[in-house]
Amino acid sequence: MTSRRLLVRVRRARGGQSRGTGRLCAAGLLAQAGLLGKLARTSGLGVAGGLVGGISGLAVNVAVARGLRDGSPGAADVVTLARATVACAVAGLVTDAAWGRAESPALVPLAAAALVLDAVDGAVARRTRSASEFGARFDGEVDALLILALSAHAARPYGWWVLTGGLARYLFAAAGWAWPWMGRGLPPRYWRKVATAAEGIVLVVAAARVLPRPATRVGLAGGLSLIGESFGRDVLWLWHRRDLPV
């Protein structure tokens, strides 16, 4: 095969990949607008919540388009984008509640759906062998967004200390900008997912108000402890390698 033909094939492959990513992001934006519109009609989503949900959804889809500009989305990425769409809607509903609007009855079911989809995208990635470095990062950022929204919601009745769990991922990222050794890539670790899932579950339980306040407070403290331990272990791992080239 001549080099010219090879170049043509590469360009065509890249074009197909970019079209696949473009279609996914266009579908993601339409799904986000549709979900927010449905919540506005049926669950009283207000202007502030709609703006937060819409801007979050736009940011997510722009990030996906940038992250997959040289690749094509896998089946797990589609599931994770669906979960991100739900998480953005949750963030919008939490914003409305923070601004004094009545809490939407859709908040807990949507948050629970996002948690279920977190298990689904991992299973899909393994079954279809579509796991990727981008997919792992994308999954982690969606986790962070959902936990931030739910921890902000739980902080009002249970204390602002609960918000620490939601801010942990962003404080960790900020530390990576301040100290280059903190920005080193981390190896995969299953316990990280366990801690994140546990924190998400206790936050959904807190939002559902199905347990007495003392029990919920204990659960929130336990979830925060798991998140702190997980991030602390990552910081120690990075600290021991701080003198190595980044």
Image: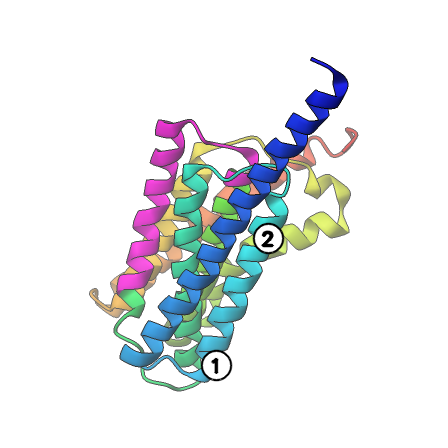
Compared with residue 41, is residue 140 higher up or lower down, i.e. above or below?
Answer: above
Q: Between residues 143 and 191, which one lies in front from this camera angle?
A: 143
Tell me the residue at 44%/63% (across/down): 30
Q: Between residues 130 and 226, which one lies in front from this camera angle?
A: 130
Magenta-colored stretch includes residue 7:
no
Give the residue type that dot 1 points to.
Answer: Ala
Tell me the residue at 69%/42% (across/down): 183
The Cα–Cα distance between marks 1 and 2, rounded to whole angstroms, is 22 Å
Q: Can residue 216 be seen here? A: no
Tell me, for residue 63, which label it has, or none. Answer: 2
Mark 1 surroundings: few (<14), some (14-19) or many (≥20) residues within 10 A: some
Give the residue type that dot 2 points to.
Answer: Ala
Compared with residue 87, is residue 121 higher up or lower down, i.e. above or below?
Answer: above
**Is most of the magenta stretch helix, strand or loop?**
helix
Q: Earlier in the sequence, mark 1 or mark 2?
A: 1
- Does 207 sit left or right of 239 as displayed? left
Q: How is the image coloured?
A: rainbow
Q: Which residues are magenta?
A: 109-135
Quadrant, the C terminus: top right
Q: Which residue is mark 1?
A: 48
Residue 38 screen position, x and y as percent? 32, 73
Tell me the residue at 45%/57% (across/down): 28
Q: Secondary structure at mark 2?
A: helix
Compared with residue 41, is residue 147 higher up or lower down, i.e. above or below?
Answer: above
Q: Can residue 44 be seen here? A: yes
Tell me the residue at 39%/71% (across/down): 36
Mark 2 surroundings: few (<14), some (14-19) or many (≥20) residues within 10 A: some
Residue 158 screen position, x and y as percent? 38, 71
Residue 87 screen position, x and y as percent? 41, 60
